Amino acid sequence: MKPPRFRYCSPESLEEALAVLGEFGDEAKPLAGGQSLIPMLNMRLARPSVLVDLNRIPALAGIERTDRFLRIGAMTRHRAVERSESVARAQPLLAEAIGYVGHLPIRTRGTVGGSIAHADPAAELPGVLLALDGTVELQSRRGHRTVPARDFFVDLLTTSADPDELVIAVRFPVLPPRSGTAWLEVARRHGDYALVGVGAVVTLAEDRRTIRDARLCFIGVGNTPVRATGAEAALRGQPAAADTWRSAAEAVRNELDPASDIHASAQYRRSVAGVLTERALALAVQRAQEGTAG
């Protein structure tokens, strides 16, 4: 199929791109890597009047690490994240999850900001961002604002960004000492969208045998990435042991409310989520105790 007619703009600066978005509002659509937008155009699932190509704005790409967070520009390619030593050291959960994003050609072209803005509930990067309590930087001609991931993902393919706002970067906070992470998912084949995926983040107490804090974020089980806050609360203060993982898995099965579709039933997704919870928590704790993080 061919896309509907649209006006094509190729700005060379952020200011120029924001001007176009400000003028056309929800009639305009930013084009980053195009790995999701182009198929949607071809299938007539998206019909923007104006396409704003961001690929000639180099200032929107780059990886920056500070003492508090890892900042990744919106136009940074998945492949650049995958190959970055800074990402591997600062955010091992992101480094592990990025390899599950599509296939190599997809990761070579796809962008971090594009994935976050697209907000597919089965995509890895939104899940990682929510698991790490990350934030999204938005820019418009009206100004700049930062939105926590928990407030950014609103519904299926829907975010809290206004039509004239552009995702310019995402921030992943640096984890505290004695933390470990793990990303696991189940898909029909590697590179396909996850039927269920989980990101686990565990921080141990000083004795390295007690859980001080835990986060569990799931993809593929709702209209947005889902934090299992009840299971997280139940994990705090518990021993880092197999019985704890089993209890957490049961809490996750009771807490999640996935839908059935042609790919998997709700019952299957809940069952898989529980299994992945046990495995991810055990692996994250092992890494925290060994000091390898992820």
Image (spheres, rainbow, N blue to C red):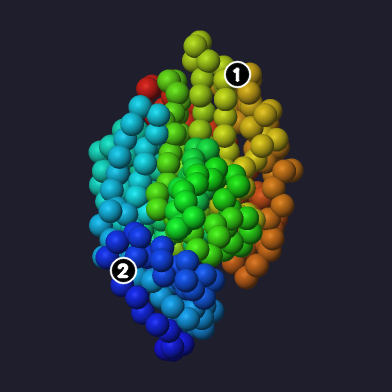
On the image, numbered disc 1 is attached to which residue?
239
Q: Can residue 276 be seen in this view?
A: no
In the image, is residue 59 above or below residue 149?
below
List x then y, in percent, for residue 11: 31, 68
- Mark 2 neighbour density, 10 Å: few (under 14) some (14–19) many (20 or more): some
Identify the element where label 1 is drawn. loop
Which residue lies at the image location 38% right of the left edge and 71% below the top edge?
Answer: 52
In the image, is residue 142 above or below residue 204?
below
State the residue in front, 167 or 225: 167
State the residue in front, 204 or 285: 204
| Residue type marked 1 | Pro
Q: Quadrant of the C terminus?
A: top left
Identify the element where label 2 is drawn. loop
List x then y, in percent, for residue 203: 51, 24
On the image, numbered disc 2 is attached to which residue?
11
**Does residue 83 appear to the left or right of 199 in the view shown?**
left
**Does residue 37 appear to the left or right of 262 in the view shown?**
left
State the residue in front, 264 or 76: 76
Q: Can residue 134 be seen in this view?
A: yes
